[in-house]
Amino acid sequence: MMTEKEMTDLAVELGFANVAVMDTKDLTFVPSFRPLCEENLCGKYGANYACPPDCGSVEEMAERIRRWPRALVMQTMWDIEDPLDEARTKPAKGAHNDMTRRLIERADRPGLMVGAGGCSLCSPCAIVKGEPCRFPDKRYSCMSAYCVFVQEMAEKCGMEYDCGPGVVAFFSMFCFDPGQ
């Protein structure tokens, strides 16, 4: 089982631009963010077990994170002119989440992944066929589903949230208990 230092070193080795560890009690959850998921811009609302309304209430989601005292926060930055360009952002989010999953597998410790986008382990998600989740232990929800105030989290971690024109940043977390 890796230590915090070993996990941060591995995150840098895997290619994350910035990495920090913070206490999950210092995260802010904003319930008024949930209606943004309901707009369904990503197409996963009601079509993915890891997304609203099926992932749980804002309070349940916050409790899931707070169960773990620490969070390894990871950031990637991508040269993408238009942050609404799905053809560019979707693969970048996928690569970011793949790096996060690789880190978690190698860290070999219990915890919770919070992704840069909704779970994409199965396409389509089993929910659309009325079947149970194929990977309930690996399923992950995104920062938006948890209603994490990402800009504030980034600032607390010493990371830029708005990286300037032509650069898009994505964030993920691995929440864990240093005593486990």
Image: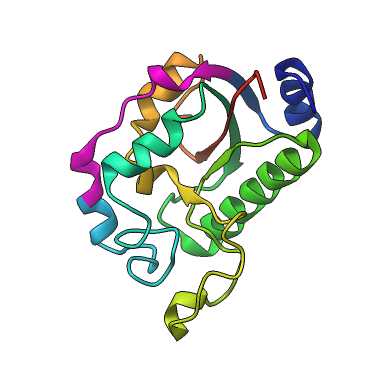
Total residue callouts: 0
Q: Quadrant of residue 40?
A: bottom left
Q: Quadrant of residue 13?
A: top right
Q: Is residue 37 left or right of residue 175?
A: left
Q: Nearer the viewer, residue 108 or 32?
A: 108
- Where residue 60 appears, as percent x and y from the top left, is 32, 43
Residue 154's place in the image compared with 110, above or below, is above
- Where residue 39 appears, as percent x and y from the top left, is 24, 61
Q: Is residue 118 left or right of residue 52?
A: right
User: Which residue lies at the image location 44% right of the left edge and 15% below the top edge?
Assistant: 156
Magenta span has 133?
no
Q: Quadrant of the C terminus?
A: top right
Q: Nearer the viewer, residue 159 or 44?
A: 44
Q: Nearer the viewer, residue 136 or 100?
A: 136
Q: How is the image coloured?
A: rainbow
Q: Nearer the viewer, residue 89 or 40?
A: 40
Find the magenta span and give its range.
Answer: 21-34
Q: Is residue 45 left or right of residue 177?
A: left
Residue 2's place in the image compared with 95, above or below, is above
- Where residue 76 appears, as percent x and y from the top left, is 61, 36
Residue 115's place in the image compared with 40, above or below, is above
- Where residue 113 appears, as percent x and y from the top left, is 57, 42
Q: Quadrant of the N terminus?
A: top right
Furthest residue toward bottom: 129
Residue 146's place in the image compared with 125, above or below, is above
User: Which residue lies at the image location 77% right of the left edge and 34% below the top edge?
Assistant: 107
Q: Is residue 8 left or right of residue 167?
A: right
Magenta span has 28?
yes
User: Which residue lies at the image location 76% right of the left edge and 43% below the top edge?
Assistant: 105
